[in-house]
Image (tube, grey):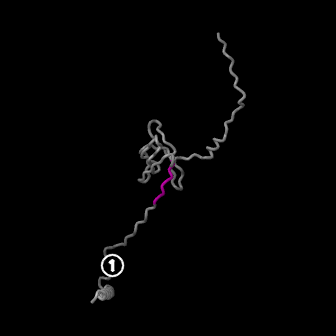
C-alpha cells in the first residue's frame, strides 16, 4: 500500500468509529450523569467589564509659597459635574486628585489621579486668559481730566 491509500483508509476508519461511538454514548448508562448534576455545578458567568470613568479636566491656575509652604492652585472638572477649585500642598488629596510634587520655580506640578501621575505646567495646562478682555484693555485709553488745568498749590507758610 502506498501513502495515499494508507491515509484514505485511516480517514475512513476514523469516520466510521466516530459514528459508532456517538450511538454507543447515547445508549450508555452514564449518559444521564451530566443531567443529574450531582455536584451542583454551575456554568461560569463572565465578569462584566469595568466601566472606566473618564479622567477629569484639570487646569493649573497657580503656584504659591505663601507662609513658607508650597501650594498648587488648580481647577478640576469631571464630565457633567460643576467646576471644583483646589488649593493643595504636597501630599494632600481632594476630588480624587493628589498633589505629588510642586516645582514653584519652573511652574510644574505633578498630580496623581487613579494611580496615574500627570505633570501640569502653565504653558500646556495653565489657565488661559480671555483674548477679548486683553484686547479691550489694550484698546481703551485712560481718561484724563482736563490736562491743561493744574492743581493749585497751597500758599507758602510764613517763617517766624
User: Residue 155 or 28: which is nearer the viewer?
Assistant: 155
Query: Is residue 49 depicted above or below 112 in this figure?
Result: below
User: Residue 67 or 63: which is nearer the viewer?
Assistant: 63
Q: Is residue 54 magenta?
A: yes
Q: Name the residue at 40% across, 68% down.
A: 46
**Image quarter (top left, top right, bottom left or bottom right) of the C terminus:** top right
Q: Residue furthest left?
A: 1
Q: Residue furthest top?
A: 160
Lateral position of residue 20 relative to residue 117, left or right: left
> Can residue 119 be seen at all in this image of the molecule?
yes
Magenta part of the chain: 52-59
User: Can you identify the residue that label 1 sits on?
Assistant: 34
Q: Name the residue at 45% across, 61% down.
A: 51
Q: Secondary structure at mark 1?
A: helix
- How many marks can you see? 1
Q: Residues within 10 Å of mark 1 (few under 14, many from 20)?
A: few
Residue 21 falls in which quadrant of the image?
bottom left
Q: Is residue 89 magenta?
A: no
Q: Name the residue at 29% across, 86% down.
A: 3
Q: Residue furthest front?
A: 2
Where does residue 40 sit, x and y in percent of width and height?
33, 73
Where does residue 155 sit, x and y in percent of width and height?
69, 18
> Can residue 27 be seen at all in this image of the molecule?
no
Where does residue 45 sit, x and y in percent of width and height?
39, 69
**Image quarter (top left, top right, bottom left or bottom right) of the N terminus:** bottom left
Query: Is residue 23 depicted above or below 104 in this figure?
Result: below
Amino acid at each position: 500500500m502506498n501513502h495515499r491509500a494508507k491515509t484514505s483508509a485511516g480517514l475512513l476508519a476514523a469516520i466510521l468509529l466516530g459514528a459508532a461511538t456517538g450511538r454507543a454514548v447515547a445508549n450508555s448508562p452514564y449518559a444521564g450523569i451530566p443531567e443529574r448534576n450531582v455536584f451542583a455545578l454551575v456554568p461560569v458567568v463572565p465578569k462584566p467589564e469595568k466601566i472606566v470613568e473618564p479622567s477629569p479636566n484639570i487646569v493649573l491656575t497657580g503656584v504659591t509659597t505663601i507662609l513658607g509652604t508650597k501650594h498648587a492652585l488648580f481647577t478640576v472638572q469631571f464630565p457633567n459635574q460643576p467646576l471644583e477649585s483646589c488649593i493643595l500642598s504636597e501630599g494632600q488629596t481632594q476630588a480624587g486628585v493628589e498633589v505629588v510634587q510642586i516645582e514653584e520655580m519652573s511652574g510644574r506640578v505633578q498630580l496623581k489621579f487613579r494611580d496615574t501621575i500627570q505633570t501640569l505646567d502653565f504653558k500646556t495646562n495653565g489657565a488661559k486668559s480671555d483674548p477679548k478682555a486683553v484686547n479691550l484693555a489694550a484698546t481703551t485709553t485712560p481718561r484724563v481730566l482736563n490736562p491743561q488745568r493744574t492743581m493749585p498749590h497751597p500758599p507758602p507758610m510764613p517763617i517766624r
